[in-house]
């Protein structure tokens, strides 16, 4: 049964249709990706589902009693000014209001005036019972404890709760934001670019979290590797409509290509039939076969036309043929990069050879961008960096800081050395800027448009050594695929940083891992790198286990004095005391649980809160008692 269903939905902006006749449904447990080119209406559709954006026509059905939660692409400014604790409590504003209402009703019910008026008292009691039932159902008595458990579980401390939320990294914000939402146990979860600003380790954490999420998921993401790991359905917005595909992204891509080939074949077959009919009509419309010609014309008029398979107007280009360079394109010797109180890279050596395509990976903050900037001379370092013979580098800056003008796109191309306006237009068109787009001012471009303009400028430099820092950021899936194809065919040398694992698999033939101030090279793509890292970790763990076993065997082989009779008697007494303590605490825990689950317990809020506090204390004491019992048991067995 559908938990969310959209039928014949239509949305327009300024008289121009953005979404038309949108139809899809999600059943309980679906994990679906919403994909499509930048600007096709994905985030708009999310806002419509959330009720924050209007629409002209259609229906939206959401199963009764379901809770929908939303992880936005960008946090509200007001949230960034809060402390971590205040940010987490923000999700529970309704329960805090409800708690205050319960306290207010308690005071009202305790007044003499209400106690002497049975009707007013009954009304207040009914209001209190309804509010308390909702408060209890939504975990009102325990949500603060649950928040603390999540914060501590994610590795944060009590002191961190008072820190401004704005001071946390992008990955930390995403984890905390998602944890805050999931604490309310939503039935439907909407995520808009949840893996933005996450490093590879954090993305793998998010993948596992969402794989285990028991509710229904709808997410927007351009990360195809991420989609392969998480989703079982793909909803593609194309030409203002939505089409649904079963499976993850790779399965969707295969189905779509199969459908495209089938449609192309059907289209070409129909076009031949149309040409034959038109030729027959033209030849015989005035002759003895005019009746048959009119029949053919009628047949042509009734023919339901197959639409020509459309192409996405993204980027489609090839990098220019790279001039030959020396065999050693980049040589790094004993390079150290550090800042006061912080070491990034320590005495690293590395040689990048001609025609290799190397992905530089590592945790956020490990120094990847700084290393690239050191190579192009924009970051300080100690040691030696040398470019090889006839090497012409070009740099793609993820911050897009290398624009030359404050004018429009044509001005930028002319400043780069393009000689004519027509040549500039033709070049911009190859990178997805068509028609009036060429008059957009550089400072008004979106993130994706800035990335495409940077790639246009890169094309003009005729470099044989490309240094790219997060080139796929802000690009939609179709533009990423075009960039992949261009880089696969590029005959120069490539060094790039990317969190897009699908992109790394398609482009790189080597992976350079930057961690703990050093570089380790893996001679393969991302999947090979991941496999080798896991293999090395298993070897290291096996060696550690072997070493620990040898140490234990050596300890056991040593002659240990026998435990005296008096010591054994003392241990027996301690064991009985530990068992008694555990037994008493278990009985007390069972009693408190029974009292908390009894009918009417929560009619007295203060009593329920006190019982819950007692239960927390008993559980903590019981954990310590178990530890004491286990320790004494081990001593008894020695």
Image (cartoon, rainbow, N blue to C red):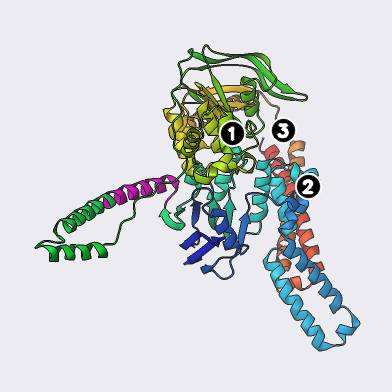
**Residue in front for this viewpoint, 598 or 43:** 43
Query: What kind of element bears circle 1?
Result: helix
Q: What residue occupies the far left of the structure in this picture?
A: 288
Q: What residue occupies the far front of the structure in this picture?
A: 286
Is there any visible trace of residue 350 in the rendered image? Answer: yes
The vertical placement of 436 against 201, above or below, is below
Crowdedness of circle 2 by 10 Å Cα count: few (<14), some, many (20+)? some
Bounds of the magenta span? 247-266
Residue 391 sits inside the magenta stretch: no
Q: What residue is pinned by disc 2?
A: 161
Which callout, 1 or 3, points at the residue further toward the start of the chain?
1
Q: Residue at 28% of width from left, 52% of height from top?
A: 267
Q: Position of residue 211 (x, y in %)?
A: 53, 49
Which callout, 3 or 2, points at the residue further toward the start of the chain?
2
**Residue in front for this viewpoint, 328 or 339:** 328
Is there any visible trace of residue 619 in the rendered image? Answer: no
Q: Position of residue 352 (x, y in %)?
A: 52, 18
Numbered disc total: 3
Query: What kind of element bears circle 3?
Result: loop
Q: Quadrant of residue 295?
A: bottom left
Q: Residue at 30% of width from left, 50% of height from top?
A: 262
Q: Residue at 70% of width from left, 20% of height from top?
A: 380
Q: What residue is pinned by disc 1?
A: 412
Is 634 left, or right, of 57 in this rendering?
right
Crowdedness of circle 3 by 10 Å Cα count: few (<14), some, many (20+)? few
Q: Which disc number belongs to residue 563? A: 3
């Amino acid at each position: 049964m559908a938990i969310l269903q959209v039928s014949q939905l239509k949305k327009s902006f300024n008289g121009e249709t953005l979404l038309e006749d949108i139809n899809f449904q999600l059943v309980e447990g679906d994990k679906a990706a919403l994909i499509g080119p930048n600007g096709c209406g994905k985030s708009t559709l999310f806002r419509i589902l959330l009720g924050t954006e209007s629409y002209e026509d259609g229906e939206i059905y959401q199963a009764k009693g379901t809770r929908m939660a939303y992880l936005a692409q960008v946090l509200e400014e007001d949230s960034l000014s809060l402390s971590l604790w205040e940010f987490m409590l923000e999700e529970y504003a309704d329960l805090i209001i409800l708690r205050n209402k319960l306290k207010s009703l308690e005071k009202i019910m305790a007044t003499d005036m209400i106690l002497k008026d049975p009707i007013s008292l009954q009304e207040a009691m009914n209001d209190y019972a309804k509010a308390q039932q909702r408060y209890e159902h939504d975990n009102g008595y325990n949500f603060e404890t649950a928040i603390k458990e999540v914060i501590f579980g994610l590795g944060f401390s009590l002191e961190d709760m008072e820190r401004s939320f704005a001071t946390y990294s992008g990955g930390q914000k995403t984890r905390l934001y998602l944890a805050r939402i999931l604490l309310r146990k939503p039935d439907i979860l909407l995520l808009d670019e949840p893996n933005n600003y996450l490093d590879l380790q954090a993305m793998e954490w998010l993948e596992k979290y969402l794989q285990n999420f028991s509710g229904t998921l709808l997410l927007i993401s351009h990360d195809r590797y991420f989609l392969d790991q998480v989703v079982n359905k793909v909803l593609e917005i194309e030409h203002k409509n939505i089409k649904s595909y079963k499976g993850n992204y790779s399965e969707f891509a295969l189905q779509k290509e199969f459908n495209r080939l089938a449609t192309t074949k059907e289209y070409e077959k129909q076009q031949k039939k149309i040409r034959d009919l038109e030729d027959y009509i033209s030849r015989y419309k005035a002759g003895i076969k005019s009746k048959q010609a009119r029949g053919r014309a009628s047949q042509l008029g009734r023919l339901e036309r197959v639409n020509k398979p459309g192409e996405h107007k993204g980027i489609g280009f090839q990098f220019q043929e790279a001039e030959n360079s020396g065999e050693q394109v980049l040589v790094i010797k004993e390079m150290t990069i550090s800042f006061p109180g912080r070491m990034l890279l320590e005495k690293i050596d590395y040689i990048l050879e001609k025609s290799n395509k190397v992905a530089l990976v590592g945790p956020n903050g490990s120094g990847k961008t700084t290393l690239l900037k050191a190579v192009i001379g924009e970051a300080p370092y100690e040691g030696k960096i040398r470019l090889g013979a006839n090497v012409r580098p070009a740099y793609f800056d993820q911050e897009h800081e290398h624009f030359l003008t404050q004018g429009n796109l044509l001005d930028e191309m002319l400043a780069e050395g393009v000689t004519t306006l027509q040549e500039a237009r033709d070049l911009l068109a190859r990178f997805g800027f068509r028609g009036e787009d060429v008059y957009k001012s550089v400072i008004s471009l979106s993130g994706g448009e800035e990335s495409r303009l940077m790639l246009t400028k890169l094309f003009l430099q005729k470099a044989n050594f490309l240094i790219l820092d997060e080139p796929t950021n802000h690009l939609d899936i179709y533009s990423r695929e075009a960039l992949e194809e261009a880089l696969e065919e590029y005959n120069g040398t490539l060094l790039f940083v990317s969190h897009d694992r699908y992109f790394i698999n398609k482009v790189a033939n080597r992976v350079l891992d930057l961690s703990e101030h050093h570089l380790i090279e893996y001679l393969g793509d991302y999947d090979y790198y991941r496999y080798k890292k896991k293999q090395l970790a298993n070897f290291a763990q096996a060696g550690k286990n072997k070493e620990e076993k040898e140490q234990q065997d050596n300890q056991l082989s040593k002659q240990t004095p026998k435990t005296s009779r008096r010591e054994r008697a003392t241990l027996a007494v301690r064991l009985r005391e530990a068992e008694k303590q555990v037994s008493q605490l278990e009985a007390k825990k069972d009693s408190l649980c029974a009292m908390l689950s009894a009918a009417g317990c929560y009619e007295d809020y203060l009593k329920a809160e006190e019982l819950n506090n007692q239960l927390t204390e008993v559980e903590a004491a019981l954990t310590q008692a178990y530890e004491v019992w286990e320790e004494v048991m081990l001593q008894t067995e020695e």
